[in-house]
Image (cartoon, helix red, strand yellow):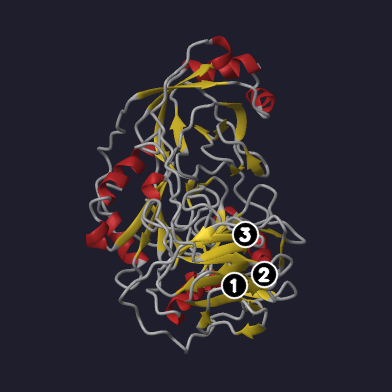
């Protein structure tokens, strides 16, 4: 085993085979409480382990893991699922050309050999499937696509998979299927689970219709209370709380508020518990009509707050302070002066139902209460016991403007040694421009000189954390944020330290980033064991 740094609360275990990975995954599930592990993300030949840094550390975890016997692992075998595919993918000809075979032979190999789900990741319902005889091992695209349609059937490395939702991705597209591999309205949202066996068939040659698990859509509740009417959502207004920590087994990343310190502050201001769901408003432009008396607050990215009363009187309120609103008032947030995301909370909280343990909306996985729309009504919860309001809340970071250079501390790893020394020097010495293609999934960065790799081989998919700095083949970094894919296939050269993640989530387009490593890249040493 190798033990590689990921962040201040995470490390990665690298193994020799998929079978070893599955064996260690099974063993680790029994050690969560004992070893203070919070989450694991298994992948092709690695397991990312997140732990509680207050109670343990990476060196201790490495020594524990190195003592485990992973020699007897057997991959479970599950039910057989048939997936009809229209083989008309954009990359089908390129795949055939790379393998030196015809398009027909690609389709034959994909349909004549049974696949099995090894693990899930990247996004909910995204299953990494392997086949012993298909021999369709192809590299990922040089640069990932920004948008891949839901149902796309794709290849990368030794794996085949199906994109459950429209999302970015770097896999080679060979076809598309109508089968929904992820559906929150089914009793079991994920159609494909570790161990499931999959038989792909050419839909153009089969007139048979294959039945799927029943999906019954549950409509979002239309509350009788109309306490707030949304007049303008601005660029984007989402429900957010602390996110879905511990849901990696379903292929679901953490998501949650991009600036958790601002979320906690806005709730303290109005006397709520810090994880009470609030509205995350991107770049201002929010406007709402108040239909009942309430206490609200706004924190995060700096913007003007204007109140227009029922008598058309206007006044301005300050951020990080409680604001008393009355029936007929209209509250409006101007464009952000610095930072990107502001947070709006009401005393008592909103009447909103969680989805898979959280009210956060994950823009990649499309999980959670839907983004707000104009003319939508919101209902308030009227709790009898609340905390006192806080008058002492202040921003914990200096929110940047598009003209600023933002310095972010980083931990080098887990794949720093895949890059040349010159690339590592460039990563930390040159400025990285934040491009308009950035969002909650990640910041796409552009530097004058791309980063070159020392190891050119394909990297098997492995777990990633919030703050991971992934380097695609074009050498231009992508800084993963809260809605990042759970696993990825491009090497991660480093990760933004946990204490700078809120700041990273507030960096606007056109700002520049300078990365500051807090130490050298160094593997952790596990204790000696006959099982390793």
* Mark carried by residue 149: none
Q: Which residue sits at x=58%, y=42%?
A: 457
Quadrant in the picture for residue 424: bottom right
Q: Which residue is mark 2?
A: 513
Q: CA distance from mark 2 to mark 3?
A: 24 Å
Q: Nearer the viewer, mark 1 or mark 3?
A: 3
* Tag 2 secondary structure: strand
Q: Is residue 497 left or right of residue 358?
A: right
User: Neighbour class for label 3 at 10 Å: few (<14), some, many (≥20)?
Assistant: some
Residue 252, percent from left and from top: 43, 49
Q: Using the rendered image of the protein, determine whether residue 481 is visible from the camera's viewpoint.
A: no
* Tag 3 secondary structure: strand
Of the image marks 1 and 3, the number of the one nearer the N terminus: 3
Q: Camera-side residue: 267 or 81?
A: 267
- Residue 54 against residue 171 in the figure, above or below: below
Of the image marks 1 and 2, the number of the one nearer the N terminus: 1
* Mark carried by residue 236: 3
Residue 18, percent from left and from top: 39, 38
Residue 471, percent from left and from top: 62, 53
Outermost residue on the bottom side: it is 392
State if disc 2 and disc 1 touch (CB < 8 Å). Answer: yes
User: Neighbour class for label 1 at 10 Å: few (<14), some, many (≥20)?
Assistant: many
Q: Which residue is mark 1?
A: 408
Q: Is residue 269 left or right of residue 317?
A: left
């Amino acid at each position: 085993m190798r033990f590689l740094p990921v962040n201040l609360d995470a490390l990665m275990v690298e193994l020799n085979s998929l079978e070893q990975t599955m064996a260690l995954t099974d063993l680790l599930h029994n050690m969560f409480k004992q070893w203070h592990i919070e989450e694991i993300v298994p992948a092709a030949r690695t397991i990312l382990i997140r732990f509680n840094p207050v109670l343990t550390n990476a060196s201790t975890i490495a020594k524990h893991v190195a003592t485990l016997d992973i020699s007897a692992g057997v991959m479970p075998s599950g039910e057989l699922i048939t997936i009809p595919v229209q083989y008309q993918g954009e990359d089908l000809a390129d795949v055939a050309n790379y393998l030196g075979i015809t398009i027909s032979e690609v389709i034959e190999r994909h349909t004549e050999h049974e696949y099995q789900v090894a693990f899930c990741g990247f996004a909910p319902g995204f299953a990494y499937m392997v086949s012993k005889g298909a021999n369709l091992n192809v590299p990922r695209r040089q640069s990932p696509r920004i948008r891949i349609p839901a149902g796309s059937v794709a290849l990368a490395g030794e794996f085949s998979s199906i994109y459950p939702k429209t999302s970015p991705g770097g896999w080679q597209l060979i076809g598309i299927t109508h089968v929904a591999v992820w559906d929150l309205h089914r009793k079991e949202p994920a159609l494909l689970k570790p161990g499931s066996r999959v038989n792909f068939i050419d839909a153009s040659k089969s007139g048979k219709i294959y039945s799927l698990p029943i999906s019954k859509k549950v409509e979002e509740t239309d509350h009788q209370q109309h306490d707030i009417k949304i007049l303008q959502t601005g660029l984007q207004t989402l429900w957010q709380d602390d996110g879905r920590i511990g849901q990696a087994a379903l292929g679901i990343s953490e998501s949650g508020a991009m600036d958790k310190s601002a979320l906690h502050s806005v709730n303290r201001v109005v006397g709520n518990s810090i994880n009470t769901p609030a509205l995350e408003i991107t770049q201002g432009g929010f406007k709402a009509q108040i239909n009942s008396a309430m206490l609200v607050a706004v924190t995060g990215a700096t913007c003007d707050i204007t109140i227009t009363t029922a008598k058309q009187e206007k006044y301005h309120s300050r951020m990080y302070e409680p604001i008393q609103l009355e029936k007929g008032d209209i509250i409006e947030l101007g464009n952000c002066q610095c930072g990107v995301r502001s947070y709006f909370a009401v005393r008592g909280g909103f009447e909103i139902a969680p989805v898979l343990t959280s009210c956060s909306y994950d823009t990649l996985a499309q999980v959670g209460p839907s983004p707000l729309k104009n003319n939508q009504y919101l209902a308030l919860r009227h709790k009898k016991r609340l905390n006192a309001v806080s008058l002492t809340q202040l921003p914990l970071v200096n929110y940047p403007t598009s003209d600023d250079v933002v310095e972010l501390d980083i931990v080098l790893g887990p794949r720093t040694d895949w890059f040349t020394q010159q690339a590592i020097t460039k990563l930390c010495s040159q400025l990285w421009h934040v491009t308009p293609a950035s969002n909650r999934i990640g910041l796409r960065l552009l530097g004058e000189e791309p980063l070159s790799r020392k190891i050119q081989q394909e990297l098997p998919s492995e777990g990633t954390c919030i703050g991971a700095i992934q380097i695609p083949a074009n050498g231009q970094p992508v800084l993963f944020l809260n809605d990042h894919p759970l696993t990825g296939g491009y090497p991660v050269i480093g990760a933004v330290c946990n204490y700078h993640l809120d700041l990273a989530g507030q960096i606007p387009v056109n700002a520049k980033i300078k990365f500051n490593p807090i130490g050298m890249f160094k593997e952790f040493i596990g204790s000696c064991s006959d099982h390793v």
